């Protein structure tokens, strides 16, 4: 009787082992499919973002050409971009001049179209005559 119980237990163990192996294999395949779907989705999103960046660059170039802005001076454009970025983040004109190693007057000249009027410059009031 004890021998039969051992044989049955070994048989059940073998069946459970095979069942466990097949279920694990199916779970791995499902996990791999899900990972591939995420990968494809990320790649599509990256491609969309790259296309949007290309479109923005082309739009920028078109606008610059329509406005008559010289787009050949890349260094000047990069300097303006960096200075404007620092200004928008709250850096003072002096800090920007020190960071970019140019004079404060040059920084003010670069940023003048982008700078907000301060109260010391005297804004016009609707009731002023």
Image: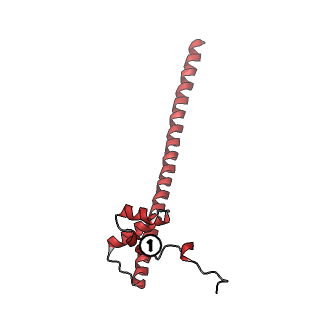
Residue lying farthest right? 127
Foreground of the two, 26 or 78: 78
Foreground of the two, 1 or 89: 89
Count of marks overlaid on the render: 1
Quarter of the view holding residue 85: bottom left
Report x, y in % for residue 81.
41, 69
| Residue assigned mark 1 | 111
Foreground of the two, 73 or 54: 73
Residue lying farthest bottom? 129
Q: Quadrant of the N terminus?
A: top right
Report x, y in % for residue 30.
52, 46
Q: Image height check: is 74 above or below 13?
A: below
Q: Disc 1 on helix, strand or loop? A: helix
Foreground of the two, 40 or 55: 55
Report x, y in % for residue 112.
45, 75
Using a 10 Å C-alpha cutoff, classify the residue at mark 1 as few (fewer than 14 neighbours), some (14 to 19) or many (20 or more). some
Q: Residue at x 35, y 78 (%)?
A: 71
């Amino acid at each position: 009787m004890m021998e039969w119980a051992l044989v049955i237990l070994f048989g059940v163990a073998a069946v459970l082992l095979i069942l466990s192996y097949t279920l694990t294999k199916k779970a791995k395949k499902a996990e791999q499919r899900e990972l591939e779907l995420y990968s494809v989705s990320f790649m599509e999103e990256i491609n969309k973002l790259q296309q949007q960046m290309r479109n923005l660059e082309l739009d920028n170039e078109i606008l610059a050409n329509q406005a008559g802005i010289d787009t050949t001076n890349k260094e000047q454009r990069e300097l303006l971009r960096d200075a404007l970025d620092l200004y928008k983040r709250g850096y003072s004109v002096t800090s920007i001049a020190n960071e970019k190693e140019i004079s404060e007057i040059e920084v003010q000249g670069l940023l003048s179209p982008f700078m907000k009027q301060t109260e010391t410059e005297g804004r016009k009031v609707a009731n002023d005559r």
